[in-house]
Image (tube, rainbow, N blue to C red):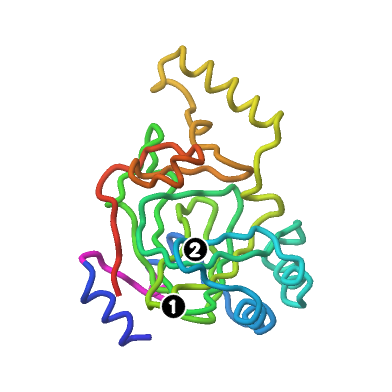
Amino acid sequence: MSDLLDRLNEVNDVEIKSVFDESFNEFGVVHSGYDLSELITYMENETEIPAEGNVYVPSVEAMELTHVAATIKSVIYGGMPIQIGYCNGRNSTYNGFEYHKCSELNIAVNDMMLVLGNRYDIKNCHYNNDDAKVFFVPKGTMIEMYDTTLHLSPLKVCDEGFRAVVVLAEGTNTPLATKEKKQRDDILTNLANRNMEDQDTEVELLLARNKWVVAHPDRKPLIDQGAYPGIIGENKELFY
């Protein structure tokens, strides 16, 4: 791990730390002592890394029926309903962030990086990319990101790309129902007729169930989905 982390810091102009560094404590925690072999084996044998971009699947029944899934639900989520899916891809940029009102678990099936920030640094629906921190997640590591932590998909550290298990509260990242969309749009209409600085504008970021997103204006796929174009600063790419 040390050699790869050193290499990543050599070729990038931002500092990259390990999730085992104490600076990660601001954003989450590393969980150990869990047998993750069932999930990792499934990911390696049954999922693919796309040739371009990322693929995200919120819920996979086979993963949710593993023994460790029941333990994660009971111990880490306190018995609350969860979903287990995955995100695989070749992403190398950080130009968008999301947050949920629950913790998110990621299991690194292979080495990867995460770019993290704090939700409270979003001001009037805008976030400065320079405030984000980059962390290296070694293969086989399970991390929890707190509900105050901004994040998005992992970033690759090799040509193959990355595979990551994603655990969230049940229903997260699924489309808003028609009634939910209407309630959001009604609030947005009311806000448009008032002084935005005096209002709770979080609704501007609501993109899906339990999913609030802010994107760089250049990140067309997210903008096309309806993400708020509120990232300030460079559209950054990380190298390996």
Residue 93 position within the rendered picture, expressed as x and y whole percent measured from the top left: 35, 59
Give the labeled residue for mark 2: 28
Task: Please name the residue shown 53% across and 57% down the image.
Answer: 146
Q: Residues within 10 Å of mark 1 (few under 14, many from 20)?
A: few
**Magenta highlight: main SS:** loop
Taking depth in this image into account, of 26 and 184 the one nearest to the observer is 184
Taking depth in this image into account, of 84 and 146 the one nearest to the observer is 84
Total number of numbered discs in the rendering: 2
Task: Please name the residue shown 47% across and 54% down the image.
Answer: 149
Q: Secondary structure at mark 1?
A: loop
Callout 2–callout 1 Cβ contact below 8 Å: no
Left or right: residue 55 compared with residue 123: right
Quadrant housing the N terminus: bottom left
Give the labeled residue for mark 1: 160
Q: Secondary structure at mark 2?
A: strand
Residue 52 position within the rendered picture, expressed as x and y whole percent measured from the top left: 44, 64
Q: Nearer the viewer, mark 2 or mark 1?
A: 1
Quadrant housing the C terminus: bottom left
Badge 2 amino acid? Gly
Badge 1 amino acid? Glu
> Which picture quadrant has residue 14?
bottom left
Which region shows up in magenta?
A: 13-22
Task: Please name the residue shown 47% across and 29% down the image.
Answer: 201
Q: From the viewer's perspective, is residue 55 above or below residue 187?
A: below
Furthest-top residue in view? 193
Which badge, 2 or 1, comes first in the chain's sequence? Answer: 2
Taking depth in this image into account, of 153 and 54 the one nearest to the observer is 54
> Which picture quadrant has residue 45?
bottom right
Q: From the viewer's perspective, is residue 108 above or below residue 189?
A: below
